[in-house]
Amino acid sequence: MGSGFSHGRVNPETGLNSRLEDFVATLGRCIDRALAEPVDLVLFGGDAFPDATPPPFVQQAFASQFQRLVAAQIPAVLLVGNHDQHAQGQGGASLSIYRTLAVPGFVVGDRLETHRIQTQNGLVQVITLPWLTRSTLLTRPDAEGLSLSEVGQLLIDRLRVALEGEIRRLDPELPTVLLAHLMADNARFGAERFLAVGKGFTVPLGLLSRDCFDYVALGHVHRHQVLCESPPIVYPGSIERVDFSEEKEDKGFVLIDLAKGQTTFEFCPLPVRVFRTIEVNLSAADDPQATLLKALKPEAIQDAVVRLVYHLRSEQLDQIDTTTIHQALSPAHTYTIHPEIISQFSRARLPELGSGTTITPLDALKAYLANREDLQELEDDMLAVAQSLLAEEEHAWLRSAIAAEEEATSDAQAEPQETQLRLL
C-alpha cells in the first residue's frame, strides 16, 4: 500500500492518490469477506508497504481496515516481509507498532516463532517465518572463504535446523499453518523482482512440504500460484496490480477451510483496476493517425491504466496529431504514450535475400542498393569499395592457407610417422 503512485492521479476531493484509494478499497473487500463469513483468523503474508517508513496517511489507511477485525474480535497475524524491514534488515518497523500498542488479537510475526491462537472455533498453531536476510542466520566469520553457492547452502542448513526446532514443539493434535515470506525455488516471479529491497535467498520446496503443516501460506511473490497440493503450499499473490508486469495476472485472496489433514482452499478473485498495454505498428499504414485512433477503443480503455506504444517511421511523425491522441485517451484513468521510431534498417528482408537463396556478398549488396533510392548516387563507389574489401579478404585468406600448408609440411618432415598417425 503506497506503491504505484505514478499510475494514479490526485483525487481533488480527498487529496489522496487514486492508486492508494484503489488499494484501500481492495483491502476493504478482503475484510468485508472476512466479516461476512465470518472467518476465524486472518493471515497477512507481509509487505504491507513499499518500505519500512511509509507516510502516516498510508499507515492510517492500512490500519483503518484491520481495525474492523479488532472490532469484530477476529484475530490476525501480520507477517513481516522484506519491504516492511529496514534496508539493513533491522526489524519490521512498519508493523511493530501493532505489538507496541498491544492491539487486541493482533500477532506480529517478525521472527521464527510458533503462536497458539484462540479463535471462535478452537486453537490453531501458526509458525511465522518472516523474510530472512543473510545476517539473520550467519555472522561475518561464518561466510568467510565460502563461495556464493556454499553460503546459500549454509543458509538453508541453518534455516532447516531452526525450523525443525519449532516443528518439534508443535502440538500434533492442533491444526497448523506455516506463514512464511520467502522465495520458493520453483515459484514464478511477479513484480517483486523489481521492488526487492536487499537480496534474499531461495528456499527449497522440500523444506516446506512437511506432513506436520496443514497449510503453508506464502507471501513475497505477487503472482497467485499453488506450488503443492499436499500439504497446500500457496502464494495468494498481491491484492492489487503494482505495475504493467502484472497486467495479465488475476488478483485476489485465498479462503481456507483448515482442519487437521483435511484442509481445502479457494482462490477468490478481486475486481481490481485494469492495466492495459496497446501496441500499434504504424510503419506500413497509409494513414497512421486514423490507424492509431482506431486502436483506441473507448470500451477497452475506460477507467484503465493505459500504456500506448506505437511504432512509426521518422517521416510519419508529422502525420500524428498528439492533441487528438490525448483526447482519445481521456476515458482512461491514467495513460502514458511511448512513440518509437523504427530504424530504416529494420525493414523486412528483400525477396532476393530470402531464406534458401544462395547469393554472393557482392550480389547481396547490389540487391540492397537497388531498393535504396537515397543511395543511387553512391552505388558505383560502394560497389567498388566492396570489391576491394572482398579481394583483400580473399588474398588474406589465401596467404593464411599457404602459411598453414607450409607449416604442416615442415612438421611432416620433422616428424613424418607421428604426423601420419595423427592424420589417420
Image (cartoon, helix red, strand yellow):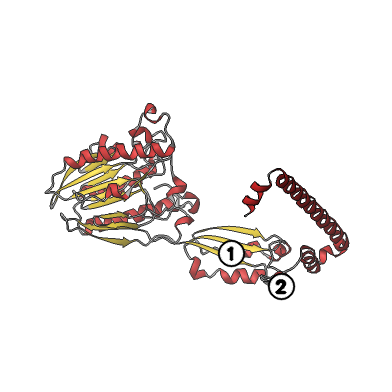
In the displayed orientation, state which residue is furthest to the top.
141
User: Visible in this render: residue 132?
Assistant: no
Coordinates of residue 406 in the picture (x, y in percent): 77, 48
Q: Quadrant of residue 312?
A: bottom right
Say which element carries label 1. helix
User: Visible in this render: residue 220?
Assistant: yes
Does residue 412 lie above or below 147 as drawn?
below
Query: How many C-alpha atoms fall within 10 Å of the one at disc 2: few (<14), some, or many (≥20)?
Result: few
Front residue of 129 and 292: 129
In the displayed orientation, state which residue is furthest to the front.
417
Question: For residue 184, which numbered disc appears in the image?
Answer: none
The residue wearing badge 1 is: 327
On screen, residue 112 versus residue 133, left or right, reads left
Mark 2 residue type: Pro
The residue positioned 31% from the left and 48% from the top of the image is 45
| Mark positioned earlier in the residue sequence (2 or 1) | 1
Front residue of 106 and 61: 106
Query: How many C-alpha atoms fall within 10 Å of the one at disc 1: few (<14), some, or many (≥20)?
Result: few
On screen, residue 198 versus residue 284, left or right, reads left
Cα distance, mark 2 to mark 1?
Answer: 41 Å
The residue positioned 25% from the left and 58% from the top of the image is 255
Coordinates of residue 210 in the picture (x, y in percent): 23, 49
The residue wearing badge 2 is: 351
Front residue of 28 and 316: 316
Say which element carries label 2. helix
The residue positioned 25% from the left and 45% from the top of the image is 77
Coordinates of residue 413 in the picture (x, y in percent): 73, 45
Coordinates of residue 10 in the picture (x, y in percent): 48, 51
Q: Quadrant of residue 315?
A: bottom right
On screen, residue 148 versus residue 418, left or right, reads left
Mark 1 residue type: Gln
Does residue 88 lie above or below 366 as drawn?
above
